[in-house]
Amino acid sequence: ARSSSEPDSIRFDGNSRMYICDYGHAALLTTARGKIVKLIHEFEDHPLLGPNSVAIDAKGTIFFTDSGPLGTTSLENPKGSVYVASRVGGSADQKAARFVLQPVMNQCLAHPSG
């Protein structure tokens, strides 16, 4: 599968499902049937800046930073965020699992990463 964009960080969950932070698509991507699809691309009807780092815990909860390309957010204009996406309505091995997205820190960080 090809994203045709700007992937920055890739992680796999316990079921070998791949998650990709992608600047170009300004989304957290995943794979489904050999294709790359947008999993999360907005919060409360506002587009993400461009996720850049992702981590996944043993329960399949996804944590990611959203700061966009370098220069999008700064000390003078902090717009970066950290989000947590919790799985609801299904087990971790289901392809149609849904996520609830919540901010840990919302639009207040200079350039969150890592």
Image (tube, grey):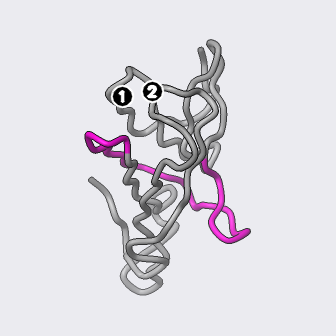
Q: Which residue is at 56% across, 37% downward?
A: 29
Q: Residue at x 59, y 14 (%)?
A: 1
**Does the magenta run of residues contain 51?**
yes
Label disc, if present, on residue 102 of the rendered structure: none
Tally of numbered discs: 2
Left or right: where does residue 43 sit relative to residue 63? right
**What amino acid type should be assigned to the residue bearing mark 1?**
Phe
Helix, strand or loop at disc 1? strand
| Circle 1/circle 2 CB separation < 8 Å | yes
Q: On screen, 47 above or below 90?
A: below
- Residue located beneath label 1 in the image: 12
Query: Which segment did they paint magenta?
Result: 40-60
In the image, what residue occupies the spot 61% across and 49% down? 40
Q: Residues within 10 Å of mark 2 (few under 14, many from 20)?
A: some
The vertical placement of 108 against 56, above or below, is below
Secondary element at image label 2:
strand
For this orientation, the residue located farthest to the bottom is 76
Q: Position of residue 105 (x, y in %)?
A: 39, 76
Q: Residue at x 73, y 68 (%)?
A: 45
Distance between mark 1 and mark 2 Cα atoms: 5 Å
Q: Farthest residue in the right direction? A: 45
Answer with left or right where residue 112 lies relative to residue 78: left
According to the picture, the residue beneath numbered tag 2 turns out to be 18
